Image (tube, rainbow, N blue to C red):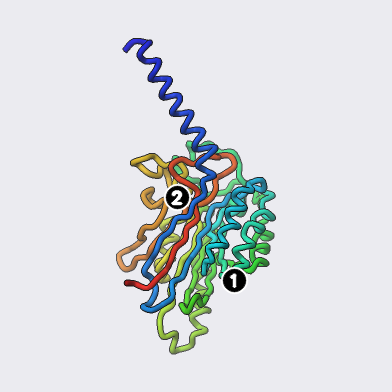
């Protein structure tokens, strides 16, 4: 092939690469969307329950379009709101985050939350190739986000803290128990503490117990296999997680290149089933609404919230 014939090819490839770069950095990461699912998890005759899951906002104070979009989600009138961590994306984002979540808290629907690593540690510049290789699960720097103030702010909005804890709610006539783990990505998860809280709920029922078993929902930020197994062991019928960003950059025909944990990449976004030899649960991994301010890119992976309708089996 002559130099003359190679030149147009190089031009086309260069133009395509530039287009992909501009799309993924300037356009797609602002195209917020709602991913919807329906799951047959309720007893016959039970009223449907609409669960809104928000994850990985990585919010920075200047991201007004994201703040306004999150505020608009109150119009969906969910029955339960679940926040699966990494809400903070900047050291000064706490006030903006609480302002974004306030309309959802005012709907009257219960709001529960667990933390992710970025709710303890602010973003720093990292080599993206290390992200593709193997995720680090150790922190070598001092915590720089005031997590106690973040937790207090969420609780003052009426949100329920599920970090290594459990709670019981009645939602549209259905008893729901939510089991939560703090972030396994930085080894803050404590299944024993969660089970202590769960045992306290069970003790309240007395010897006879409820007529029907409650629906159990597991909540965790990073879907590491060990953490998923712990929630499965405690009877979760649905597990909600985030962390992966859906891969953040997905290749057409291939999907996610990484899950940033030991979850198979095929399950890095959306609804699937997690199971062992004895039991199974639906697993929804949200691709989340944000990204690190040092990695402002999304390709074939729009930022999302999940709206999951739980209904009776047909």
Secondary structure of the residue carrying numbered label 1: loop
Question: Which residue in the structure is indicated by mark 1?
Answer: 108
Vertical relation: 4 (above or below) 218: above
Residue 131 drawn at (x, y percent): 48, 41
Horizontal side of residue 158 vs 267, given as left or right:
right
Position of the N terminus by quadrant: top left
Q: Is residue 130 visible?
A: yes
Secondary structure of the residue carrying numbered label 2: loop
Q: Dividing the picture into quarters, in which one does residue 97 lie?
A: bottom right
Vertical relation: 196 (above or below) 39: below
Horizontal side of residue 97 vs 314, given as left or right:
right
Residue 270 drawn at (x, y percent): 41, 54
Residue at screen point 39% across, 64% down: 38
Residue at screen point 53% across, 73% down: 167
Residue at screen point 51% across, 57% down: 221
- Which numbered circle lies on residue 77? none
Residue 165 drawn at (x, y percent): 54, 69
Residue 180 drawn at (x, y percent): 51, 66
Question: Which residue in the structure is indicated by mark 2?
Answer: 261
Q: Earlier in the sequence, mark 2 or mark 1?
A: 1
Q: Is residue 90 visible?
A: no
């Amino acid at each position: 092939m002559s130099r003359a014939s190679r030149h147009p090819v190089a031009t086309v490839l260069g133009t395509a690469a530039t287009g992909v770069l501009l799309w993924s950095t300037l356009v797609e990461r602002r195209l917020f969307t709602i991913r919807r699912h329906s799951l047959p998890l309720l007893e016959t005759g039970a009223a449907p329950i609409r669960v809104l899951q928000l994850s990985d906002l990585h919010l920075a104070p200047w991201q007004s379009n994201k703040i306004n979009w999150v505020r608009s989600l109150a119009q969906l009138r969910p029955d339960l709101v679940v926040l699966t961590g990494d809400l903070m994306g900047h050291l000064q984002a706490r006030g903006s985050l609480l302002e974004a979540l306030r309309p959802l808290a005012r709907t009257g629907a219960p709001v529960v939350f667990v933390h992710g690593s970025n709710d303890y540690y602010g973003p720093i510049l990292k080599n993206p190739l290390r992200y593709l290789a193997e995720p680090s699960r150790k922190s070598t720097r001092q915590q720089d986000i005031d997590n106690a103030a973040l937790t207090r702010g969420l609780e003052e909005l009426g949100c329920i803290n599920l970090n290594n804890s459990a709670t019981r709610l009645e939602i549209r006539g259905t008893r729901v128990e939510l089991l939560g783990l703090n972030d396994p990505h930085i080894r803050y998860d404590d299944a024993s503490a969660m089970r202590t809280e769960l045992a306290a709920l069970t003790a309240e029922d007395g010897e006879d117990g409820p007529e029907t078993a409650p629906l159990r929902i597991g909540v965790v930020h990073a879907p590491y296999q060990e953490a998923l197994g712990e929630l499965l062991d405690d009877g979760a019928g649905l597990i909600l997680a985030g962390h992966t960003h859906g891969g953040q950059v997905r290749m057409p025909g291939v999907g996610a290149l990484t899950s940033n944990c030991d979850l198979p990449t095929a399950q890095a976004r959306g609804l699937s089933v997690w199971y062992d030899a004895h039991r199974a649960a639906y697993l929804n991994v949200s691709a989340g609404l944000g990204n690190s301010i040092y990695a402002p890119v999304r390709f074939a992976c729009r930022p999302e919230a999940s709206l999951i309708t739980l209904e009776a089996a047909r």
